[in-house]
Image (cartoon, rainbow, N blue to C red):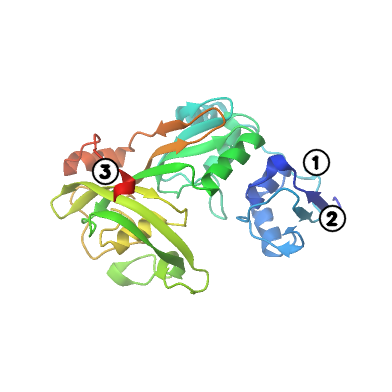
Amino acid sequence: MSGVQLITIPQEDTGQRLDRWFKRRFPHIPHGRVEKLLRTGQIRINGKRSKGSDRIEVGDDIRIPPLPEPSAIKTQKGPNEGEIRFMRDLVLYEDNDLIALNKPFGLAVQGGSKTTRHIDGLLPALGQGCRLVHRLDRDTSGVLLVAKHAKSAAWAGKAFQSRRAEKIYWGVTNGVPNPRSGEIKGYVAKGKTDNRFGNKNAGKEIMMAVRHGHAGAKHARTLYQTVQTAGAKAGLVVMQPLTGRTHQLRLHTQILGAPIAGDPKYMTDRPLPGGLEKKLHLHARELILPTPNGDISVTAPLPPHMKSAFDKLGFDTKIQLEVWEDI
């Protein structure tokens, strides 16, 4: 067992999430143990209790409690051939600094108390030192960015934090948003689901629209355009989030009267259009990222359930967008 450590963050680690930094620094400590150390205040930033999502900056002092030595913990096996093949098949783009994946529907990005298979745990199949730059919900498919080393993780992470990274999402909505195009903005905060519309997830944590000054309120902004419709029953909506709040697009489409089709949390009393699978129809379609060597643009093909929805609703993947700034 090691003693208490105080580690000062160097320039190359700035901007990283605390939990991800800790995992890379101490890979032998299980995820559940890290979460407990954070909950109990044993891992701190500059002497203050911290969350795993807190960002570390150059010069921060991180308190590390006594930890077992790597030899005292059962080592995990390296990636097998099946895991390597699975992850390589997801690759959309790769250079010396970054890898862009097409994350499938239903695969979590990070682990939790009941999640043992996730992208983060499979990253060794892409090479040592790979780390997540951002996240997607478990049931959102599409472009997910991975950094190959700490330096690229730092500058790519800053691009996301400063909103210089442009993210474009496609969503099939249950109903048609009203108005059909524009910007939706306001404050959001964590809340609990109720039992409206027969919601089986009543009591689970969700995001909700709140007024400025509400505890935990954060401002959220989304640009959106309804580019195709199937009568009044469904729409193909292209969205560009200008902030990165939890479930932002899912909540905003619900507020517009047309939640994402198949969403189990942000619902409507309108029945799901016939023939659509009961899966979240939200896809991270494109990512445009400024890099030291110029901008890169990565596009992810639709997952099978959204391809099926496009066919049934008569939607076309060749769409024409208005200029966002003119909305």
Q: Nearer the viewer, residue 145 or 69?
A: 145
Side of 58 relative to 290 (left or right)? right
Instruction: List the residue tagged with mark 1.
Output: 71
Picture coordinates of residue 187 (x, y %)? 43, 66
- Most extreme residue toward the left is 231
Q: Secondary structure at mark 1?
A: helix
Residue in view at x 43 percent, y 51 percent: 242
Instruction: List the residue tagged with mark 3.
Output: 322
Give whichever of discs 1 and 3 has the lower sequence position.
1
Task: Between label 2 and label 1, give the one nearer the viewer.
Answer: 2
Identified by mark 1, the residue type is Ser
Residue in view at x 67 percent, y 61 percent: 50
Q: Secondary structure at mark 2?
A: loop
Q: Is residue 128 visible?
A: yes
Give whichever of discs 2 and 3 has the lower sequence position.
2
Q: Which mark is residue 4?
A: 2
**Is the residue 38 above or below the residue 306 in the image?**
below
Q: Is residue 27 visible?
A: no
Task: Between label 1 and label 3, give the one nearer the viewer.
Answer: 3
